[in-house]
Image (cartoon, coloured by chain):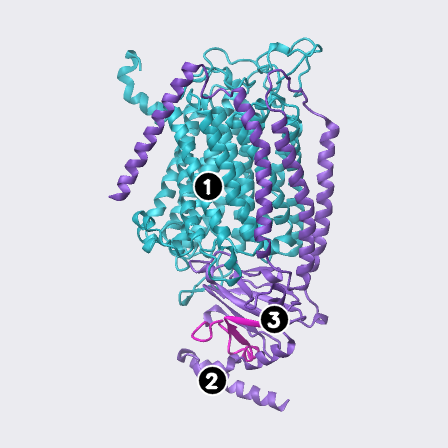
Amino acid sequence: MSGAAHHHQDNDFLFKYIFSTDHKMISKQFFITGSFMGLIGMFMSTIFRLQLGFPGESFPFLESFMGNWAPDGILSPDKYLALVTMHGTIMVFFLLTAGLSGTFSNLLIPLQIGARDMASGFLNMLSYWFFFISSCIMIASIFVEGGPASGGWTIYPPLSALPQAIPGSGFGMTLWIVSMALFIVSSLLGSLNYIVTVFNLRTKGMSMTRLPLTIWAFLTTAVIGVLSFPVLFAAVLLLFFDRSLGTSFYLSDIYIAGSALEVDGGSPILFEHLFWFLGHPEVYIILLPSLGITSEVVATSSRKPIFGYRAMIGSILAIAFISFLVWGHHMFVTGMNPFLGAVFTFTTLLVAIPSAVKVFNYLTTLWKGNIKFTPAMLFAIGLVSTFITGGLTGIILGDSTLDINVHDTYFVVGHFHIVMGLSGAFGMFCGIYHWFPKMYGRMLNKNMGYAHFWLTLISSYGIFFPMHFLGLAGLPRRYYSNTEFPMFDNLYDLNEIVTWFAILAAFAQVLFLFNVLYSMFKGPKAPQNPWDSNTLEWTTPVEHIHGNWPGEIPEVHRWPYDYSKVDENGDYIGGADFIPQTVPLGENERDEGH
Amino acid sequence: MFDLLILVAVILGLIAIAKVIQVLELANNVKGTSSYIVSEKDNRTQARLMPVFLISYFAFIIWQVVKWGDEMLPVSASEHGVVIDQLMNITWMIIIPVFILTHIALFYFAWKYAYDKNRKAQFYAHNSKLEMLWTSIPALVLLILILYGLSVWGDVMAPLTEEDDPIEIELYSRQFDWTARYPGEDGVFGKSDVRLIAGVNMLGLDSTDENAWDDKYVKAEFHIPVNRSVQFYFRSQDVIHSAYMPHFRAQMNCVPGMITQFNFKPTITTAEMREITGNPEFAYYLLCNKVCGAAHYNMKMEIIVESEEDYNNWMNEQKEFMEYGKYSFSNEKNDINKEVLAKSTEAETKNSAL
């Protein structure tokens, strides 16, 4: 720090790192908080995988830090459910919603559209702080009496409404609701900001059809969030009323713990409808940013324009639209009118069409490319694989008839972890490897990146692919162990394999964490444009400054995917295999995005 | 203390790795290579790993099919389940080739088009015909799947008629067990209310309702006759449960405050299934498949499918609701019970007269 600013040092630190309104700093705050939550979520899954892989076996080290959650080193059944619930909640909301969108929408929207910051830096800061407090409360709920929420991340009442039903539905559940309410506020503040910024602060020449696909994905994600999160807010608010104020929106005819409750006329099905009205679009809140990030990276690393730019935008919008019409496929066996089941089957399977378009466009982008295998590119390829693998089993689950027998089994666990969890995580890793130089001005180590990718890819499929078989054998999800039914006796080995891969996956993430922490401080300094990319963020200085560009914001003259563009003689236009968006169109050159 | 030592060891280990990396990076600088620029060697190595991974991935899947294929659910034991399995097989036949072809394309392209500084990538931004093609083909295939699926759905969910002559069973769920109730000889379930639950009257049957008197309820196992339709009604007294009978391809949630339904016709008896699977201890199970609390994983009931004759014999051995009443209705409800007992005697007289 220079001498002149020295007497401001304390304040500077506070406003630079803590109460920053700079989108780049807020992005890093989201990244660090989200990753921290993600680590906790992953750690939880490793612990309950130990129980599932080795049911009833004692692991004394568990007792040493979990105390009476694991008496004699064996995880107790209700705390198993507590871990499963917190794992789901943390991974879905804190890592893959806030961690993913918070990091990359914040970092990339202003930088890629050519804006000095978000439309409202203050709201953006609030968005982070609501998220931070929400995270703290969610973590705190682990330590209260009765433990954290334990009814599954979907918190269906009456289980989540009645403390008599499960210990986690006491104070822990109240904290879950408070935490999620704050989380929703955070998400809304962030999303509104993203939408306003993209629509109003684009630099000169940055028309909507010159936006990188990342921005299209972030924008659409924000719109989905604004339309669906308030519905979850309503759902948990009514749940709060039922729990604390004696209403019965979701409760009716209940006899529990030796007495009949004075509740009448409510229906848990109402909660399921409200929950999944958010819950399904939520899948795309996770998936679309990942698809946006990987579209950008696949094009850049293949040194080729993304194939079918407009079809890619169209499919993002189509997926977003359809995502609001399919929530009922989570409820095929709730006793819903079979006619509704038919309607939801129809809308659900429609999602496969834009998804297929995206896959084929990815493949065609690779075709006749000139692929540079950066770690980011590897994760992008990994995402295409998981998106295909997980997406295809969705055709089975989305069909109401087939869903009858695989509903809520491990088949579902395998499906959504691959299509949403892995694709979301791979998209996030892809983004971190690609934009780390923009975030921290330093480079990640590529060899650790390669090792991280291969270990992660192998262990991920090792964990989640066998789950399809468990599901087809009829094993329900959220079972503490498969020891109670003779029909599952031969599945022990399979469960054990899954657990070994889960442990391997956890170690692979330690490698990533190490790479990030090391490179943050000691990594080699980043060059201006390390991946020879066209987009605007690489025209900003490596060292972060307020306002992003020292002088005028550059003007945009072309779409972002002019890679390997050649003239009539077959020579690269501009002399290199990429033409930044700031370069004016040549005389006979076509603007491809339009 | 031991844990603390491990923690210290891990931290020291990480610092050591950090130092090693620093040294390697310095060495890189000296040699003029970089820890982040993708070299030609990297591109070659990673490109070669692409087909290696593809083959390993497929091999892993095939290994699983070979090793675990036999552990999957056996042939469907219900009539509609056979049709569902057909739909499942056809869906697999569509999904698997798509999976294989797209994965081959993905990893083949990644291997084939690895970076070569002497080659130019082809600038190929769009092709409307191609895009129309791969929008319309999936749309067409999905349309067929949707129509086929929905026609099966309609059949599976169709309500039974009187011609089917179904037996009726109510599956009643609570934390953490199942009870099956049969309507008895009158064929009508008696009324019930959670406020009446007490002692052996665990379903809260209304003893003032004559239809309840001959209702029979059983725990631990329930029986159904083979080749006769069964109409199930599902109820729950506390939280949401889900009645999952995987061998019959049947599942329906049990939701407090409402009655849900499902029906199927079992076609294979327990004894026959033991022969089919070669497992002399094979048993059909009703599982809970919606998380309902700590003992969710242990909430089960055995289903026994047998000949109509065996079923009738078994049924005759089960107690009617009124028989519980004579001996052990709780004292609080004594007034009602006296009245009920009087009526039941009346009913018995009537029955024997018939």
Three-letter amino acid code at the position of disc 3: Ala
The answer as to whether the residues below labels 3 and 1 share one chain is: no
The answer as to whether the residues below labels 1 and 2 share one chain is: no
* Residue B6 drawn above or below residue B155: above
Q: In front of the other: label 3 or label 2?
A: 3
Residue depicted at x 62% and y 32%: B106
The x and y percentages for residue B189 are 58, 74
Q: CA distance from mark 3 to mark 2?
A: 37 Å
Nearest the viewer among B207 and B37 is: B37
Residue A369 is tagged as none
Chain A in the picture: what colour?
Answer: cyan
- Kind of element beneath mark 3: helix
Residue B326 is tagged as 2
The boundaries of the magenta stretch are B197-224
Residue indicated by mark 3 = B271
What quarter of the picture does the N terminus of chain B occupy? top left
- The question of residue B221 being in magenta is answered with yes
Q: How many marks overall?
A: 3
- The chain letter for the residue carrying disc 3 is B
Residue B286, located in which quarter of the rendered image? bottom right
Q: Residue furthest left?
A: B1
